């Protein structure tokens, strides 16, 4: 009888035309000791994790799953320890009789499958999941389960924490303070946030429990519901880490944590708020390891990039970025600073607080407790011979007046302001008390922006636009044949979207606009002139991104733009 040939991962990828033999041979020569060929191919950029999993699924007929949609019972987790699954990069999913189901991104890794069989004494069935999906599941289940067990909380399928947990919490675990369950719980909350690329962590109290929620791609998702009895200790631990007053629970507090999670520098801005059900905490997560430098990283079109560069390349004037909280304004400002930063200029920023530390830039934190406000800081900065000044936000008349003065005396001023559109920013400055002539003389450009979710490239499908969608595109004279629909798959946690992109409205203040502002022209008249000069409204810019397959019509309509 002929011996059955066992396929290797490299053979599968070559058959699927994802790589060629030369690339396989190169990776085999250059991969690190002990590194699997799939990991090496991903590291060299020849394939993605998702492509490998799809190829294996097609070739071997093995089902691919989204681990984010599967509940894994605690009994399954106990069969394999955390060290083993982390090293092997597998995730136990289910038990069926004498068979254990594991998720892996390499079902051809027979030594690992044999190890699972020996450790559990069960037959092994494999299903496919991406490596990042598996790593997130390991962090989510093993980390949280072990921590909650040490707190006396038993995790049960499809049940939320209820009053019964009060009895389970009567005894304190006898452990060293540096390894206490509460510390591990906080660490696990932060680790899960980093793994899932969350922008915010919410700890929300209710009557008998509290929820841990993560904002991912702008949408809040509930991760865990835990008994309320541990909430005070959890909040106290967060306060200790962020240098807050742990004895004060009746007043809101703000703090900051700088830490390293899995080798990545993380900056956390903490806010606590007393509510009728207990203290609520929100943590803004800033991953400093993400490469967000440079204007080209903002997702601008070629024309938008030219306009933006023209605005910030002028030696003096005010360039404002407008939009609501969480619309990416600060990211845009830091991209400008990175673009302008060189040894020939003196750049000084005044922020509340400094979010990202930039080499070669003088960054200043305001401190209202000692009356070191934006306005007072700006007065001092102007005596430091700056070329470029970045102000975190123009909030009041004093800051606005000094910014105008700085721009008129030969400085480039970058700042943010809370307005709904670029043209409305002009009216906002005038309403603050700045004379229209001074606004016209100092203003160089305005960028209004919003964030929308990117449609998942793995599962999105193209369809003809509906009659209503066609009407929207016709209204703005945009030709459209196909639009992409969000579907949902394991790559995007069944959301249909993965990541976010900014939509921009750019107003370059030219000579015509300057005259109109100085002459007290109406807002709609200025807008009409700006559109004649090439300014695209936010909704137009958004629909262009729909046309280019980056996002969906639903995301643009959520912005509520007219």
Image (cartoon, rainbow, N blue to C red):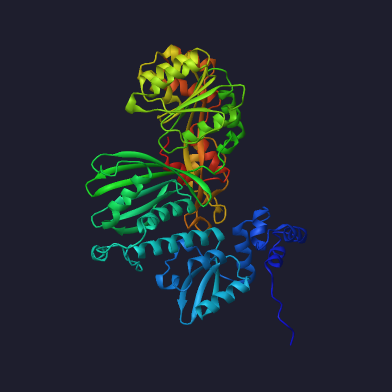
* 283 is higher (above) or lower (below) than 321: below
- Vertical order, 33 against 548 (above or below): below
x then y, percent, for residue 533: 55, 23
Which residue corresponds to the image point at 71% horizontal and 80% vertical from the top-left?
4
Q: Is residue 253 visible?
A: yes
Furthest toward the right, the residue is 22
- Quadrant containing the C terminus is top left
Residue beneath the point at 71% across and 65% down: 15
Residue at the image position 34 percent from the left and 38 percent from the top: 254
- Left or right, 136 with respect to 210, comes to right
- The residue at the far left in this view is 276
Give the percent coordinates (x, y) of residue 398. Answer: 37, 18
Residue situated in front as seen by the camera: 358 or 561:
358
Q: Nearer the viewer, residue 360 or 512?
A: 360
Q: Nearer the viewer, residue 319 or 39?
A: 39
| Quadrant of the image occupied by residue 159 | bottom left
Residue 175 on image: x %, y %:
35, 61
- Looking at the rendered structure, the number of numbered marks drawn on it comes to 0
Taking the image as drawn, is residue 468 in sight?
A: no
Which quadrant is home to the N terminus?
bottom right
Q: Position of residue 366 (x, y in %)?
A: 40, 27
Direction bottom: furthest residue: 1
């Amino acid at each position: 009888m002929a011996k059955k040939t066992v396929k290797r991962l490299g053979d599968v990828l070559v058959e699927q035309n994802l790589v060629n033999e030369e690339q396989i041979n190169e990776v085999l020569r250059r991969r690190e000791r002990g590194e699997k060929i799939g990991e090496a191919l991903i590291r060299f950029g020849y394939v993605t994790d998702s492509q490998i999993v799809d190829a294996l699924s097609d070739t071997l007929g093995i089902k691919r799953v989204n681990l984010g949609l599967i509940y894994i019972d605690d009994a399954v987790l106990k069969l394999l320890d955390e060290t083993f699954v982390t090293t092997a990069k597998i995730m136990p999913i289910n038990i069926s009789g004498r068979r254990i189901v594991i998720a892996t991104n390499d079902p051809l890794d027979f030594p690992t499958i044999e190890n699972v069989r020996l450790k559990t004494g069960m037959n092994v069935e494999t299903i496919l999941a991406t490596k990042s999906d598996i790593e997130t599941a390991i962090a989510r289940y093993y980390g949280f389960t072990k921590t909650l067990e040490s707190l006396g909380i038993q995790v049960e399928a499809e049940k939320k924490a209820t009053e019964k947990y009060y009895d389970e919490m009567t005894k304190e675990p006898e452990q060293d303070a540096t390894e206490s369950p509460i510390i591990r719980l906080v660490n696990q909350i932060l680790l899960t946030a980093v793994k899932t690329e969350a922008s915010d962590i919410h700890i929300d109290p209710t009557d008998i429990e509290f929820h841990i929620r993560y904002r991912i791609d702008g949408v809040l998702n509930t991760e865990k519901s835990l008994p309320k009895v541990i909430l005070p200790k959890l909040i106290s631990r967060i306060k200790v880490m962020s240098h807050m007053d742990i004895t004060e629970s009746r007043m809101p507090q703000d703090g900051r944590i700088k830490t390293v999670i899995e080798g990545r520098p993380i900056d956390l801005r903490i806010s606590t708020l007393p509510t009728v059900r207990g203290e609520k905490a929100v943590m803004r997560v800033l991953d400093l390891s993400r490469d967000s430098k440079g204007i080209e990283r903002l997702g601008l079109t070629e024309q938008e990039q030219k306009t933006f560069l023209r605005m910030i390349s002028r030696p003096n004037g005010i360039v404002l970025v407008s939009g609501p909280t969480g619309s990416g304004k600060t990211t845009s400002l830091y991209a400008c600073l990175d673009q302008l930063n060189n040894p020939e200029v003196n750049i000084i920023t005044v922020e509340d607080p400094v979010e990202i530390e930039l080499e070669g830039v003088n960054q200043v934190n305001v401190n209202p407790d000692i009356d070191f406000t934006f306005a007072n800081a700006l007065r001092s900065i102007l005596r430091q011979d700056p070329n470029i000044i970045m102000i975190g936000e123009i909030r009041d008349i004093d800051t606005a007046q000094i910014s105008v003065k700085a721009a008129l005396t030969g400085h480039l001023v970058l700042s943010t302001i809370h307005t709904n559109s670029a043209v409305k920013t002009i009216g906002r400055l005038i309403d603050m008390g700045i004379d229209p002539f001074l606004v016209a003389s100092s203003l160089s450009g305005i960028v209004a922006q919003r964030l929308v979710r990117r449609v998942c490239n793995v599962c999105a499908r193209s369809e003809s636009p509906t009659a209503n969608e066609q009407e929207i595109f016709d209204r703005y004279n945009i030709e459209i044949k196909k639009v992409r629909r969000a579907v949902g798959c394991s790559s995007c946690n069944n959301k249909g979207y993965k990541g976010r992109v900014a939509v921009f409205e750019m107003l370059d203040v030219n000579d015509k606009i300057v005259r109109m502002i100085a002459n007290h022209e109406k807002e709609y008249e200025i807008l009409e002139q700006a559109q004649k000069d090439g300014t695209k409204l936010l909704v137009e810019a958004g629909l262009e991104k729909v046309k280019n397959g980056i996002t969906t019509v639903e995301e643009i309509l959520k912005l509520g733009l007219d």
